[in-house]
Amino acid sequence: GAVVSQHPSWVICKSGTSVKIECRSLDFQATTMFWYRQFPKQSLMLMATSNEGSKATYEQGVEKDKFLINHASLTLSTLTVTSAHPEDSSFYICSARDGRAYQPQHFGDGTRLSIL
Amino acid sequence: GNSVTQMEGPVTLSEEAFLTINCTYTATGYPSLFWYVQYPGEGLQLLLKATKADDKGSNKGFEATYRKETTSFHLEKGSVQVSDSAVYFCALNYRMEYGNKLVFGAGTILRVKS
């Protein structure tokens, strides 16, 4: 149980395009979803937290207009990297948890984004 | 503030050796503690968790005990296998006004040789 599906797993696109990444909880209702960024051989950096039906809460230093997050349902959140540039290339990972106390976050398999 | 410190890697062991990866934390309140594992090119998988002091989390031969007195959550396994080679992250979970937040350690690379 507690499966999180992230799509696509790998995307390569030209500079200036926008890229959407989907994160779905397959067998539970995710009241909260999280988006992380991971640089090579480093830990995960939390970008934003989103609760279903409300605006995402962004971490300090993360551009809201650059990284658009939508959490319109209890099973789907999307991250859109707008007007992507090579410096946005990274490994993006989503996670989700249900609303019960002490429940862990369950992670997707990540999306490797490469901007040419 | 809340933070997690893990031992630096890489940790290189022979198959069937004993594994310890140290993890200590600082936190306000009473966080839950987790170990996650990341295989190359993949996301994170929950390995084990503990929600209160003296709890022992265990899974797949790995175990860790929540030690409040030493603020530690060290990961151990009695006999590692090549397939255990991965990056291991210690994390704590604490409550924010808008929900729960995970803080990760830097990660420890484990390499097991046959």
Image (tube, coloured by chain):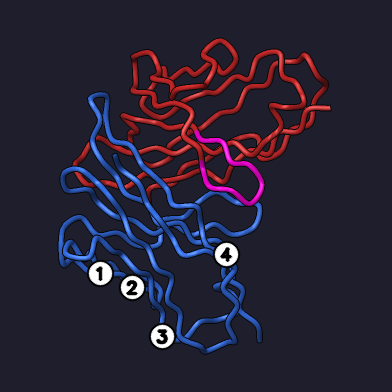
A96 shown above or below B79: above
Q: Earlier in the sequence, mark 4 or mark 3?
A: 3
Give coordinates of residue B36: x percent, y percent: 43, 57
Left/right of residue A34 with respect to residue B39 in the rendered view: left
Report helix, strand or loop for mark 4: strand
Q: Relative to the observer, which residue lies in front, A9 or B101?
A: B101
Left/right of residue A80 with respect to residue B4 in the rendered view: right
Q: Amino acid at mark 4?
A: Ile
Q: Which chain is red?
A: A
Q: Residues within 10 Å of mark 3 (few under 14, many from 20)?
A: few
Q: Which mark is residue B109?
A: 4
Q: Amino acid at mark 2?
A: Glu
Residue furthest top in the image: A65
Q: Which residue is mark 3?
A: B78
Q: Which residues are magenta?
A: A36-44
Q: Residues within 10 Å of mark 2 (few under 14, many from 20)?
A: many
Give coordinates of residue B92: x percent, y percent: 32, 49
Q: Which mark is residue B21?
A: none
Q: Are marks 1 and 2 on the same chain?
A: yes
Residue B53 position by quadrant: bottom left
Residue A45 lies in the magenta stretch: no
Residue under the image location 32 percent in, 47 percent down: A104
Q: Earlier in the sequence, mark 2 or mark 4?
A: 2
Give coordinates of residue A21: x percent, y percent: 60, 27
Q: Which mark is residue B65?
A: 1
Q: Which residue is mark 2?
A: B63
Report helix, strand or loop for mark 1: strand
Q: Relative to the observer, which residue lies in front, A72 or B42?
A: B42
Q: Chain of mark 3?
A: B
Q: Chain B appears what colour?
A: blue
